[in-house]
Image: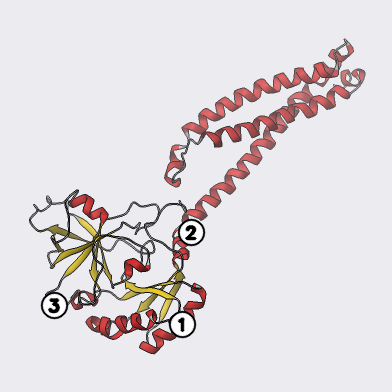
Amino acid sequence: MSGTEPGLSPHGVLTAHLAVPAAQGPEATPRVYRPLLERVRSLPEVRAAAVISMLPIQEAWTNGGYTVAGRPAPPPGQDWVAELRLASPGFFGSLGIPILRGRDFEERDGEKGHKVAIVNETLVRQRFRDENPLGHRITVGDEFTVEIVGVAGAVRQAGLDHEPLAEIYLPYGDADLTGLVSDMVLVVKTAGSTGALAPDLRRTAHAVDPGLPLYRVLTMEQVISDSLALRRLNLWLLALFAGIALALSAAGLYGVISYLVAQRTREIGMRMALGAQARDVIALVMRQGSRLTAIGIVAGLIGALALTRWLESLLDGVSARDPFTFLGIAALLVAVALLASWLPARRAARVEPVIAIRSE
């Protein structure tokens, strides 16, 4: 899953949450976000900077219904839903998200009488198919209508284990919308070290507004890694318990076959007294162990295949019936079983026949 394409370029990107007081409301953009971005973009080695209301992969599931002008409304109970985001100009370039059609946001977007939006390619596939969506108007939540001016690439907003959702980006300069968010996320693309950039961002934010805190300062690569933390923990625990189960299986198998061979010590002594060679005795025991092992391996494979369905929800890009895993574990257990047969058979074959016959 860590190799899944997220739809963005995380390398060299530093993110930080901005807690803007609710009192700023509609004035947050001209008083805080815009001057902050101007200062950040002027920092050495900063290639691009922007703000977004919810950072992809880190946050999701803030959505709303929408309709497309000139299209029949969806049936009751089957509303069209899209993720809603406020974004500044330069956001898509900061994260390497391509603009497939149209243009990026401009600073004048969101002003009175200039309501626009950028949608992602997932929404375009769902509602416009092969039609050009630019110029179409969509109404979000029966509250405001915007014109589509761009189409951005699809991003896995809800995590690497979720397919990209339909998404509508709105300009951060829209005073009617800015007051609806409690914080924004600063996204900075740098050509240098992201670690060295963090102190500069804090100083810049303090210069714009001494009461403006920056928190959750993370690289985009850390954001992606953190999104997999719970799944990674579950799989490490599963791997630990699977390893313990494998060790117990191998130890139990060795013990059982060793015991069965030990039970035949007297028989082995009699065979050797009648002229059997050590290699004949070892071959006899190995054949018996091989038969038992073959029966156990076949039964185990059937049981494992039947019980792997519940594992499918934990796997991504890997089959729950991966043949290399099944063959590898089966080969390991066969090796343990053969070793468990060979070692006691070798010991028994070295015992003097008279001592072996008297063992019971």
Q: Is residue 176 left or right of residue 3?
A: left
SS type, badge 3: loop
Farthest top residue in view: 274
Q: Residue at x 87, y 21 (%)?
A: 356
Report the Cα–Cα distance between label 3 and label 2. Answer: 43 Å
Query: Residue 297, how many percent across, how many down?
Result: 59, 27
**Mark 2 = which residue?**
229
In the image, residue 199 sits, relative to residue 95, either above or below, namely below
Q: Is residue 193 left or right of residue 52?
A: right
- The residue under the point 15% across, 65% down is 147
CA neighbours of label 2 inside 10 A, class few (<14), some (14 to 19), many (20+): few
Mark 1 lies on residue: 200
Relative to 250, 314 lies left or right = left
* Of 211 and 292, the residue lying toward us: 211
The spot of residue 276 in percent (x, y) is 85, 13
| Residue 295 screen position, x and y as percent | 60, 23
Label 2 sits on a secondary structure element that is helix
Q: Can residue 184 be seen at all in this image of the molecule?
A: yes
Amino acid under label 2?
A: Ala
Residue 4: percent from the left, percent from the top? 43, 52
Vertical order, 250 against 98 (above or below): above
Provide the residue designation for mark 3: 112
